[in-house]
Image (cartoon, rainbow, N blue to C red):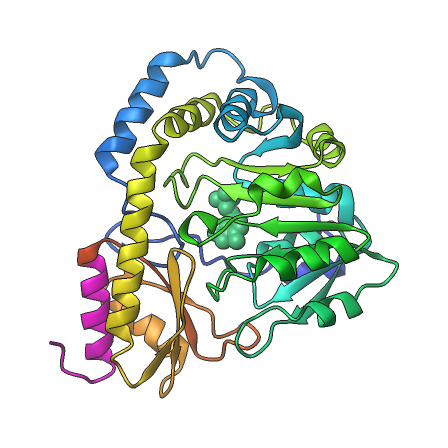
Amino acid sequence: MKIEIDEELKDLLNKKSFYECIPDSIIRMGLNENLLIDKYFSYTLLMEAIKNIDTRLYPPAKGYNALKAISEEYGIYEDEIIVGNGSDEIIDLIAKVFVRRNEAIIIEPTFEMYSFYIKLMGGKVKSVLTNEDFDIDVDKVLSQVNKNTKVIFICSPNNPTGKQYEKEKILKIVKEFQGIVVLDEAYADFASYSILMEASRYDNLIVLRSFSKSYGLAGLRIGYGVGNSEIINYLKSAQSPYSVNSIAQEVCRLVLKNKHVYDYFIKLVIDEREYLIAELSTINEIKVFPSSANFILIKLLNYSSSYICEKLKNEGILVRDRGNLPLLENCIRVTVGRKEDNIKFINTLRKILGLFHT
Ligand SMILES: Cc1ncc(COP(=O)(O)O)c(C=O)c1O
């Protein structure tokens, strides 16, 4: 039998994924995971969670135990929160419920999953470029809105540029746009501010957060969105009931109970990020951009990004080639690692660039 697939989806579904087949031995600086969280601390919480749950039972529906913990921690009403199997699930739900076959604006270069889920739903992606300095041009974004534009996705701090847009600029879009604004704050814990607590004041804003980055729970898959209860209710109604498993929900609860410990780990990431930026800034062959996230963006001035990524991989370090994205010719994205990973990365990069390492 010949399987027929929608022509429009062929390109989307035939792409080879970066995420597959990463060897165990490699230093992972390509997925914005957080290896600065103490592994033993995570393990202890996981063991405690396992003691508290009964896997013979379905988990609390729609991530309710995690949702309750988030509500209590931040003082946000329960009906203004949706918990998902990673914030990815919520992006997918937004495409399914609010974009559908209409149009959404994304501010590029940015996280690629927005356009993936929009296109999968048969929606149209309108791409608006940032300025050369990666800042958002609010007037340009608003000028692209038409009657089919249902959603504007804003990622801030933006993956992969690390740029956090000014709050006033984001709120201007929220106030002037007549559709839904999604503000993806997956990296906000590493930045100087967040709009999370104000999200439900607006009737058209959804703020997304992830437990994968600042809490190092990428493997458990848990994220959430906050917004006006009407929007959140539509999303919850479209969600499958048990997408967030019981262990993830319980670990989420325990993590929030220990938030002060995570604040310490977050500070470690920020310190390491600044260390990386300071060290790399001394290398003339590259340009290093400031970052408000747990990764940094580097532009190679004399080499192609694909060549450098391949060389780094051969030396046992995985980073992300972003050179194919608009405005990012020959750029690579490097996740902030543990001190020893960062030192190894700096020295290996220097070696590949033909410089003596100090
Ligand atoms: C901007 C952004 N949003 C969302 C996600 C997805 O996070 P999660 O692991 O919660 O699905 C990522 C993951 O890299 C991301 O970079």
Could you tell me if residue 28 is visible in this image?
A: no
Give the extent of the magenta segment.
Answer: 341-358
Prevailing SS of the magenta stretch: helix
Which residue shows up at 38% across the image and 86% down it? 301
Which residue shows up at 31% across the image and 25% down it? 45
Dividing the picture into quadrants, the one containing residue 281 is bottom left
Whether 134 is drawn above or below 190: the answer is: below
Front-lying residue, 180 or 334: 180
Whether 189 is drawn above or below 342: the answer is: above
Give how far across and how far down residue 85 sits, in percent. 54, 35
Give how far across and how far down residue 17 sits, in percent. 49, 57
Give how far across and how far down residue 216 sits, in percent. 36, 41
Give how far across and how far down residue 65 sits, in percent. 52, 20
Front-lying residue, 59 or 69: 69
Q: Is residue 347 magenta?
A: yes
Which residue shows up at 72% across the image and 72% down it? 140
Quarter in which the C terminus is drawn: bottom left
Whether 31 is drawn above or below 66: the answer is: below
Which residue shows up at 41% across the image and 29% down it? 256
Whether 162 is drawn above or below 120: the answer is: below
In the drawing, does residue 252 fall left or right of residue 59? Answer: left
Could you tell me if residue 282 is visible in this image?
A: yes
